[in-house]
Amino acid sequence: MTATSRIPLGRAQLLASTVIRDARRLRIGAEAITPVGSLRRFAPDVGDVSLLAVAPRSEHRHVLSAFARLPIVANISAQTSASLTASTERGDVTLHVTSSEHAGAALVWHTGSRAHVERLRQRAARLGLRFQQGWIAHPDGSNVSCPTEEDVYARLDLPYIAPELRDGGHELDAAERGELPRLVAESDIRGDLHMHSTWSDGRDTIADMVSASKQLGYEYVAISDHSERAQASRALAAADVARQREEIDALRARAHGIDVLHGIEVDIMRDGSLDFPDALLEGFDFVLASLHDHGGQDGAALTERYLRAIRHPLVNVITHPTNRAPGRFDGYQLDLDRLFTEAAANGTAMEIDGAPAHLDLDGPLARRAAGAGVTIVIDSDAHRTDGLGRQMRFGVGTARRGWIEPRHVLNTRTLDEVRAFVARKRARQPARG
Ligand SMILES: [Zn+2]
Ligand SMILES: [Zn+2]
């Protein structure tokens, strides 16, 4: 890996959790190891996978050398008395080490962003404190004890600011004015409305996806396989919809404690029509619509294609709206203001898709959408049981980067409210825009 290469969030998280697991198993002597840097802020791609270990000062050297000997480490590319950067086959990992007295200050420092920390540093200076390299000191050099991040912000006369908000934009001003959002959290999510099964390109059966969802504590899920002409390795044929519904009905009779919606991720065709006819779509409880390829069309044509789907009375959510791929493709050049206005007017939600290959809408766009009155849905788009929790976490982290609150999000609501959201749109005449 070169110093400039970026690692997609999903791979960065896997690498960090592998290293943390190995470090715990081999007892490298740290009380706690947590991911920091852009990984903790749920950036879509991560420039530098870094971790923070907390250990007594006398143990720091020992912790760093034990870290250097982990099996995953190929070689050491940089080292100081408080950090070590190791190369692995899957990318570089930097371990910082601090003592518990400074753990809060170090956590803030290494979590970043640089711009956020710089503003905190300036603020500390105005208050007569020095904030540097992961600790806070009085002008005479004596330490300010900051075991937690809350201590750091309190020292700076600020309320706690969540990592996902720390982009160095307006979060400090909002914090000063007492206007930080009440961010959506994983515990607010009542159900997952986008997942695939073996009926399309998923790996696991509907029964397995439902039981794994139940273990995550959800009240409801929607199974939403790809429609017939989707650019997916496998798709659900129109002729198979009835059989899939029978399977879901049979499962409903057996699955207790979780409601299963029969959903569909229907493709939006080149002319903006939908892959399945209305008569077939009406039978679904919940309809997601998406583009999986641009078909050579430009942004203006793609915008029109989306607008038709947004106005369609049976479409409830536009999934991964820009089709970006973090690190590889910035997404379609759409007229997003028009799409958001029209989605809000028509009662069509927009998705934050938590799959690491999507993370779409991203935080800033989700914020713009919510600001325009669009209902947000946060989904896993999982294709296997082990993606359900993990990808929902990425989706929620992405939403938090967009200042999204529970009140903006459809799937923080009860199933009755979700059904009412669908029913309202089906009952109305499409808005003209
Ligand atoms: Zn999709
Ligand atoms: Zn999907």
Image (cartoon, rainbow, N blue to C red):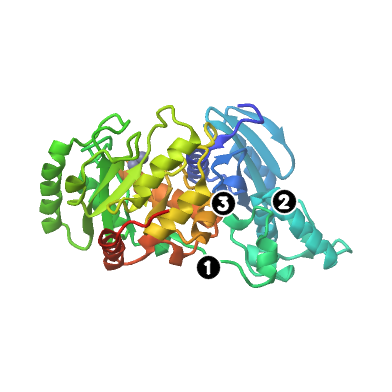
Image position of 423 (left or right of 182): left
Q: Which residue is mark 3?
A: 364
Q: Amino acid at mark 2?
A: Ala
The picture quadrant where one finds residue 61 is top right
| Earlier-in-chain disc, 2 versus 3 | 2
Residue 115: which disc? 2
The picture quadrant where one finds residue 429 is bottom left
Q: Which residue is mark 1?
A: 182
Q: Amino acid at mark 1?
A: Arg
Give ligand 2's quarter of the image: top left
Q: Nearer the viewer, residue 432 or 214?
A: 432
Above or below, comparing residue 101 to residue 114 in the picture: below
Residues at marks 1 and 2 touching, judged by CB atoms closer than 8 Å: no
Image position of 421 (left or right of 139): left
Percent coordinates x, y for residue 76 in the rendering: 65, 30
Of badges 3 and 1, the one in the foreground is 3
Q: Is mark 2 within 8 Å of ligand 1?
A: no
At 39% from the left edge and 40% from the top edge, which residue is drawn? 305
At 60% from the left edge and 27% from the top edge, which residue is drawn? 1
Percent coordinates x, y for residue 389 in the rendering: 37, 50
| Earlier-in-chain disc, 1 versus 2 | 2
Percent coordinates x, y for residue 409 in the rendering: 42, 61
Provide the secondary structure element on which disc 3 rests.
Answer: helix
Instruction: Determine if residue 156 is in view.
Output: yes
